[in-house]
Image (cartoon, helix red, strand yellow):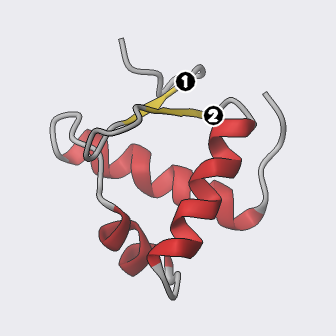
Amino acid sequence: MFSLTEKQAGVKAFIVKYMADHGGLAPNYAEIAAATGQKSKGGVHRILIGLEERGHIRRIKGAARAIEIIGGEHAQR
């Protein structure tokens, strides 16, 4: 896995906490934007692409709230 930018790390930390608090349900783009100070869902989308390219998350195409944390102590089983 590659290192993350500050924004990517913040988004990943929010996703991990949200999923822990909501029984494994991932947040939607609007919730991520509101919680991390992003101005648009497009900005969130770019950050999620970066997280996926760096091997920190996996997104399932065509499914809502379909984010899986990969590797580390927060990996889903």
Quadrant (top left, top right, bottom left, bottom right) of the N terminus: top right
Instruction: Give the residue at the far bottom of this rendering.
Output: 39
Q: Position of residue 59 (x, y in %)?
A: 46, 35
Earlier-in-chain disc, 2 versus 1: 2
Q: Quadrant of residue 43?
A: bottom right
User: Which residue is painted at 16% across and 36% down in the image?
Assistant: 23
Q: Is residue 58 above or below residue 11?
A: above
Image position of 27 (left or right of 75): left
Kindly identify which residue carries mark 1.
70
Q: Quadrant of residue 16?
A: top left
User: Which residue is painted at 32% across and 73% down in the image?
Assistant: 30
The secondary element bearing badge 2 is classed as loop
Q: Is residue 72 above or below residue 30?
A: above
Quadrant (top left, top right, bottom left, bottom right) of the C terminus: top left
Q: Position of residue 31 (x, y in %)?
A: 31, 69
Kindly identify which residue carries mark 2.
56
Q: Quick one: 55 or 41, which is closer to the camera?
A: 41
Residue 36 in sight in this render = yes
Q: Position of residue 21 (x, y in %)?
A: 21, 47
User: Which residue is painted at 33% across and 38% down in the image?
Assistant: 66
Q: Is residue 31 above or below residue 8?
A: below
Q: Position of residue 34 (x, y in %)?
A: 37, 80
Instruction: Give the residue at the far top of this rendering.
Output: 77
Amino acid type, residue under disc 1 in the picture: Ile
Q: CA distance from mark 2 to mark 1?
A: 5 Å
Circles 2 and 1 in contact, beta carbons < 8 Å: yes
Q: Is residue 42 above or below residue 25?
A: below
